[in-house]
């Protein structure tokens, strides 16, 4: 029996499975980042953009939490789309690795 008729090798199956797992993790990460961004926006709106929050920022009572929240939100917004693209790429590569003929 030749190699072309033998079916996928163990390495191809492992690569495909690993790619699917990484793809799923990246896509779930995309959605989790979206939920985190919404949560941080809500907290900033409630705690920092209100009159009380602005006074707390001015006197330093917030201990820099509003600035840290804004920075974290910006980082999440920056990496959200690349995570999705990476998840799609892993999915496509896993399909290619598993089903190449």
Image (cartoon, rainbow, N blue to C red):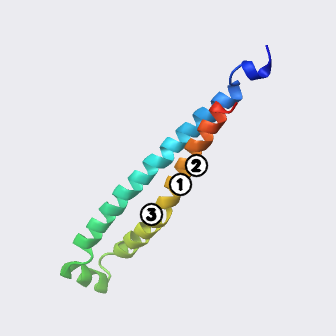
**What residue appears at the point 37 percent right and 58 percent down from the top-left corner?**
34
Q: Are marks 2 and 1 in contact (CB under 8 Å)?
A: yes
Image x and y of residue 94, in percent: 60, 38
| N-terminal-most mark, 3 or 1 | 3
Q: Secondary structure at mark 2?
A: helix
Q: Residues within 10 Å of mark 2 (few under 14, many from 20)?
A: some
Question: 78 or 9, which is in the foreground?
Answer: 9
Q: CA distance from mark 3 to mark 1?
A: 15 Å
- Horizontal side of 19 relative to 59 (left or right) equals right
The residue that mark 3 highlights is 76
Q: For mark 3, does the 10 Å Cα neighbourhood hold few (<14), some (14 to 19), or many (20 or more) residues?
A: some
Please provide percent x and percent y for residue 92.
Answer: 58, 43
In this rendering, position of residue 11 left or right of residue 17: right
The residue at the far bottom in this view is: 58
Q: Quadrant of residue 65?
A: bottom left
Residue 92's place in the image compared with 64, above or below, is: above
Question: SS at mark 3?
Answer: helix
Residue at (49%, 53%) from the top-left corner? 84
Determine the CA span between mark 2 and mark 1.
6 Å
Residue drawn at the location 29% of the way across and 71% of the way down: 44
Marks 3, 1: nearer the viewer: 1
Q: Nearer the viewer, residue 16 or 28?
A: 16
Q: Secondary structure at mark 1?
A: helix
Q: Position of residue 83 (x, y in %)?
A: 51, 55
Residue in the picture at 53% in, 43% down = 23
Q: Which residue is mark 1?
A: 85
Residue named by callout 2: 89
Q: How far apart, in angstroms, are the residues tagged by discs 3 and 2?
A: 20 Å
Q: In front: mark 3 or mark 2?
A: 2
- Front-most of 17 and 91? 91
């Amino acid at each position: 029996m030749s190699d072309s008729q033998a079916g996928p090798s163990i390495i191809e199956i492992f690569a495909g499975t690993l790619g699917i797992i990484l793809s799923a993790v990246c896509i779930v990460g995309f959605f989790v980042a979206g939920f985190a961004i919404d949560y941080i926006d809500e907290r900033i709106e409630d705690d920092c953009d209100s009159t009380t929050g602005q006074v707390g920022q001015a006197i330093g009572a917030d201990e820099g939490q509003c600035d840290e929240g804004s920075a974290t939100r910006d980082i999440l917004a920056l990496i959200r789309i690349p995570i999705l693209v990476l998840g799609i790429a892993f999915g496509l590569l896993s399909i290619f690795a598993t089903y190449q003929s």
